[in-house]
Image (spheres, helix red, strand yellow):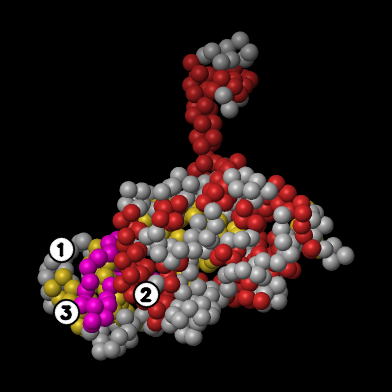
Amino acid sequence: MQFRSLVRSVMEMLPHSFGPRTRGTSPLNLAIALLLLLAVALLAAIPESFARSGIEPWSENGWYWSYQGKPVLLIGGSDDDNLFQWPEAELKAHLDKLAEAGGNVIRNTMSDRKDKGFEVYPFLQLQNGKYDLDQWNPEYWERFDRMLRETAKRGIFVQIEVWDRFDYTDSGGSDRWWNHPYNPRNNVNYTYEESGFAERYPDHPGANRQPFFYTVPALQNNQTVLKYQQAFARRMLESALRYGHVLYCIDNETSGAEEWARYWAEFIQEQARSRGKTVYITEMWDEWDITAAVHRRTYDHPELYGFVDVSQNNHVKGWAHWERLLKVREYLQGHPRPINNTKIYGADGNRFGDTTQDAVERFWRILLAGCASARFHRPDSGLGLNGLAVASLRSARAVESRIPFWKLKPRAERLLPPEQGNAWMGAAPGEGAVVFIPRQQPQPEVTVDLSDLGLKRGVSIQWINAETGDARAPEPLGSAGGPVTLRCPDAGNWVAVIR
């Protein structure tokens, strides 16, 4: 509203009892007008305030998220990546289990591939068996709305992935593209010639040969298909933008073009702005080396990508996993943003060769490296929400209640010689330190230097069992201002809280 029209509107609000001759001219009326004008200005600012009252980078420490002004660490795990597709009873039970364990984040791909048999497509299927991309399947969107509603009730945040490349491929002998509504054989909206699609896409989607991911104007400008993609994204946002507990990621581990990601990030931002909302967006690149140049597409553009997701680093083990996290923090130092890990790989017998122990170690390295989120990937690529994942979440909350992770800064130096294994540490000057010592034989003695933490007398150590979440009673620590040697109670995974 222009200032003059705003003033005119305010003056029209003045009481008629003052009479038409003096209305708007007396000192009292002018004072009332100024008060009303101030009130209108404050009211005009409320939508932006509300838009920013949801999840956002914490103003006091930009590496972490906050919700309604309070810092929040996102940790979680789930047994599927698109929980919104689950039947209602199973969804609620899984969310309850997560919340009871101290978890507060899920990953939600908008995926519709029929991996379990109960998944549905977003488009309406006609009596002839074909889909009409101009009409929605109400069941798909009712499921999505239910997931948003139930997570909001439980204080569980949602990181959405808008596009999942595995939905539009026939790789590995699947028929996902063959059966998908976007395939011209299955819809009444366009032909193969009009769309530029082929009947089959048998290559792994990492080859990026699917034209579905080239439709945007800066690439192939395929308006035939793009208008349906836009309609899908708008419908998704129609539901998601009602809530303040949602983050957005454009793709699942993409090897696509930068122009594709940028288009959809700008699209989502514009849709949010038109509704008076502020949202935070990222892209998840497929490259496992998170220090590689491709990741600078997000690192170098904080104006577009409000956080980064480094999930693919969780294919990497040991010191390299830790070192790369710290290098990314160093690279982003000029504009700190939350670093999310929505997928932690690792489970005995999985196809990547990772173990359950790998997952546990990655989880703790992520937390001690100063990342904003850590979520176990779904089985069988990850632990999901199994017993060990639940214990890990409980352990993390037990540590957080003693020394919040957002107060810690990662120690970059090795605590042990490489031949003796690994241990990881975060330190908070004036507060204490947290050390994770993983399961290894023989269980090492770890010496940590506390001399620069400014700790005084009365320092204690408390051991938390990372495999159960149980905490032992605090014990006095011999030294408060120099090197101390730590030895775990047994050969399991342990966290030492020194404060």
Give the residue at x 70% y 76%. 117
Q: Residue 475: which quarter of the image?
A: bottom left
Q: Quadrant of the C terminus?
A: bottom left
Q: Amino acid at mark 3?
A: Thr
Question: Counting residues from the N terminus, which is met first, the one under dot 1 or under dot 2?
Answer: 2
Q: Amino acid at mark 2?
A: Lys
Instruction: Name the residue that disc number 1 marks.
Output: 452
Question: Counting residues from the N terminus, which is met first, the one under dot 3 or under dot 1?
Answer: 1
* Residue 281 vertical position relative to residue 12 in the rendered view, above or below: below
Q: Amino acid at mark 1?
A: Asp
- Evaluate if marks 1 and 2 touch, with contact meaning CB atoms under 8 Å apart: no
Give the residue at x 26% y 70%. 425
Instruction: Name the residue that disc number 3 marks.
Output: 485
Dot 2 falls on a residue whose secondary structure is loop
**Image position, residue 228 (x, y; %):** 71, 52
How far is the residue under mark 1 from the one under mark 2? Answer: 29 Å
Q: Residue 303: which quarter of the image?
A: top left
- Please state which of residues 44 and 387 is positioned toward the viewer in this rendering: 387
Task: Report the mark closest to the observer, 1 or 2.
Answer: 2
Instruction: Name the residue that disc number 2 marks.
Output: 317
Give the residue at x 74% y 64%. 199
Q: Residue furthest right?
A: 128
**Image position, residue 331 (x, y; %):** 33, 54
Dot 1 falls on a residue whose secondary structure is loop
- Please state which of residues 234 and 433 is positioned toward the viewer in this rendering: 234
